[in-house]
Amino acid sequence: TQLLEQSPQFLSIQEGENLTVYCNSSSVFSSLQWYRQEPGEGPVLLVTVVTGGEVKKLKRLTFQFGDARKDSSLHITAAQPGDTGLYLCAGPTGSSYKLIFGSGTRLLVRP
Amino acid sequence: DAGVIQSPRHEVTEMGQEVTLRCKPISGHDYLFWYRQTMMRGLELLIYFNNNVPIDDSGMPEDRFSAKMPNASFSTLKIQPSEPRDSAVYFCASSPEGEGWNSPLHFGNGTRLTVT
């Protein structure tokens, strides 16, 4: 069974700090997606990484896919209160459209 | 586009009652997914459809749960009879086929179900 483990579970930081959250698996994934979910809303896609070693940037967010395609990280530079939310990684299982999600990292950025 | 629309936003019901959750996917999306989110178990896939046909329902907890997609613009998730452990936020999501399993999921804002 493919599983995605995310760490840390919770993170509370001050505005302006940098942070990294992780998504790890013992299985190889063909791609990984990162979503952000705000209270009362559904998750919203941030990025998809497809190639091992790939790095993608979205403003202050940097996403990296591990060389072996078993892990991914999300780095936020100079975090802002608007970055507060639940960050979820997700990957397809096998050759199906079933997308499994990690348990998420809940981020709080204090002003 | 209006996005994925779910109704109701909140549902409170008593144990044993039937509950029906509704979803309108984004027009033109070929895939529709039902997920359940709880603090303990996170986001779990219950069932997904392709072109209105159920493809994988292995995540449906038990026979009390059923889902239908009578046409490309409407799907329902029914729980009968409901139990307190069914309390969760239920999300519907849709996806276009074009990028294969790299296609993004577009989620609705969920239905928060409370069974007392």
Image (cartoon, rainbow, N blue to C red):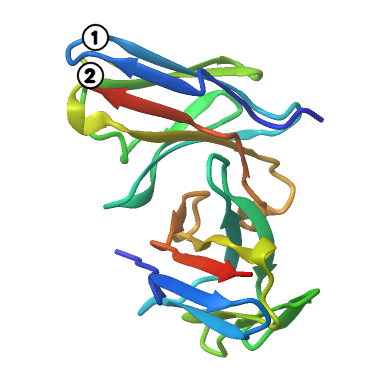
Residue A83 location, quadrant? bottom right
| Most foreground residue, A94 or A37 | A37
Q: Is residue A23 left or right of residue A1?
A: right
Which residue is painted at 71% across and 30% down in the image? Answer: B26
Protein chain holding label 1: B
Q: Number of marks in the image?
A: 2
Helix, strand or loop at disc 2? loop
Q: Which residue carries the number 2 mark?
A: B82
Q: Is residue B56 left or right of residue A36?
A: left
Q: Which residue carries the number 1 mark?
A: B17
Protein chain holding label 2: B
Which residue is painted at 55% across and 86% down in the image? Answer: A66
Q: Amino acid at mark 1?
A: Gln
**Residue B41 appears at what percent x and percent y?**
29, 52
Q: Is residue A10 visible?
A: yes
**Residue A75 appears at what percent x and percent y?**
62, 82
Q: Could you tell me if the residues under marks 1 and 2 are in contact, i.e. CB atoms within 8 Å?
A: yes
Q: Amino acid at mark 2?
A: Ser
